[in-house]
Image (cartoon, grey):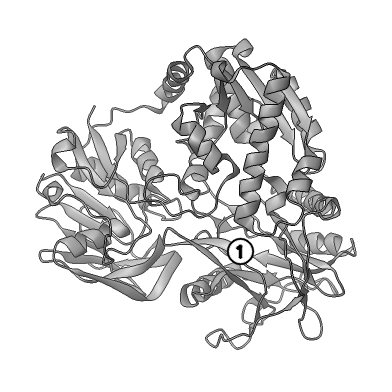
Amino acid sequence: MQHIAILDFGSQYTHLIARRVRELGVLSKIYQPDILAKNLPADIAGIILSGGPQSVYEPGALAIDQKIIKLGKPILGLCYGHQLLANMLGGAVAPGATREYGRAELEIIQSSPLLSGLESPTTVWMSHGDTVTKLAPGFSVLATTTDCPIAAASDEARAIFGLQFHPEVHHTSSGKKILENFVINICQAEREWKIENLLTDLIEKIRRQAGAKNVFLLVSGGVDSTVCFALLEKALGKKRVVGLHIDTGFMRQDESAWIKKALTAAGYNNLRVEDASLIFFERLRRITDPEQKRTIIGQTFLDIKDKIAAELNLNNDAWLLGQGTIYPDTIESGATRHADRIKTHHNRIDAIQEMISQGRVIEPLADFYKDEVRQLGRLLALPDELINRHPFPGPGLAIRILCVSGEPSAMPALSITDIDNNVHCQLLPLKSVGVQGDNRTYAHPLAIWKSPSLLRACPEYVEGRGLGEVLDWEKLDALSSQITNSHHDINRVLLLLNPPANNFAGHLQTAFLTPERVKLLQRIDVIVSEEIKHAGLYDSVWQFPVVLVPFGQAGQESVILRPIVSQEAMTANFARLPKTVLASIVDKIIATKKISFIFYDITNKPPGTIEWE
């Protein structure tokens, strides 16, 4: 079947490109970037070069076979691919004066079949530090942004196009139209691929991979593992699939009991629940590093699985380990050839990778995204209460509770001078994981609070709540992007929802994972969940992590609210919650008498990841 060839330079979004092409009804296949031109199929309709974490001018940077350019197939370079084309064909690339992460406004300055049908200006999604500074011979500038003079370029005589932004992500408003222009109009690819074939293809693939072996499936009870459970049973039959839910002690309140009841009601009664909380707490007792946390959790899952398998007399030679891994887990763990490791997911630790290389793991959903998994769940007739749940990380609340060792730490010195004078700001003595330009960051957040330029008067004002005005979310969004783009040592911006009357001050205290801290976060998580459900917002918020940090006054802690909106979790916007909902959440959290400060994470992805660790 005719298809679009995608050369993967390690972008966080490579599989998302492939998915977008499939959505157009055209088959797409991913290839390594060092593939020779002669080894590409003759019937490819066009070629897309993905983004990636490298700089094209560095020694040893990834490139493509020069003969690929001479194949005469239309080529579209995205981000790194755009820079690579410029570098290879006689242009120049250098670090940009200003980095761009998140939204930008694209001004189209020259008509082109690639940008046909787009309004100007139009919103695009950027994630880059380098930029094309000089066009290659034969190329023309098609579009610009404020900080990127060559945001789109083309050599239309050779049908070669480059975009500094990412049309494949949901947040580029006309991204689907751009890809349709390239795939359908420029490449003239035929629409032969159908989504209806996906379930049948998956079932056939499971049967081929499993052969005569059975599957011992780790079931967290989230959307992914639940759909995987249903898919494996449909492909192999109930007798060949055994589920194991491990209660780590880091679940949401009453989570494990709910999972057992819900899955049993849905007909999935071959599930064992194991309380392993004491083991997890012991192994993580004094661990503070987030990567070490994730690795220990992943290994402990395997150890518990082996213990239960031995009790059930499950012979390793006759059983495969099943996991509900989806694509974001794989790419963020750096498990594809050229991708940077953003954070190690528990289902991608080294021991799992070794089992995968030995053919002992089956992961039917590893190439798919959350919303595609939900579509599969509907095809499998799973109830809405299971497939519409907010995503919850496998390590659970363990990675939403920041841990610190050592002496109490005061707030770091501030050297930021380019923020609106009306905005109060302070670096916090915390760090979190981020993703910028397909690379991992680990940096400080900046707290900001009340300013007349960001907030406006509102008839809803309620005296004493601390949120006396309605938040101007768009101004806050723009300010957050400005800060993270301009300051390399900041990867998140937090809005302080309950600023004190006097100076803002606090200390970072030594704290580890303890049952008491978990119970506190469970209690606050229930408050947040009930409030957004009561307000009818549960389905409009993709996910709502609440992070507990050992920072505050008088030995108290603080929380960070992180509601986000996304389609597939590869990019995300912070959610714009109504002021009245936020005010109620703040009141109820303060009423616990355990929390000093409540922050609202107003960082998009990129530059922040969805989870903090």
The answer to whether 562 appears left or right of 513 in the picture is left
Residue 262 visible:
yes
**Residue drawn at 42 percent across, 24 percent down:** 196
Residue 221 visible:
no
Q: Is residue 101 above or below residue 503?
A: above
The answer to whether 195 appears left or right of 164 in the picture is right
Q: Quadrant of the C terminus?
A: bottom right
Specify the quadrant of the image occupied by residue 110.
Answer: bottom left
State the count of labels.
1
**Residue drawn at 84 percent across, 50 percent down:** 515
Q: Is residue 281 above or below residue 482?
A: above
**Residue drawn at 70 percent across, 46 percent down:** 396
Q: Amino acid at mark 1?
A: Ser
Q: Is residue 196 above or below residue 356?
A: above
Q: Quadrant of the N terminus?
A: top left
Question: In the structure shown, which secondary structural element does the residue marked by tag 1 occupy?
Answer: strand
Q: Is residue 414 above or below residue 154?
A: below
Which is more toward the observer, 360 or 32? 360
The location of residue 397, given as percent across then percent down, is 72, 49
The answer to whether 25 appears left or right of 233 in the picture is left
The location of residue 468, given as percent across then percent down, is 77, 74
- Give neighbour class at mark 1: few <14, some 14-19, many 20+ (Cα, 10 Å): some
The location of residue 233, given as percent across then percent down, is 59, 17
- Quickly name the residue at label 1: 432
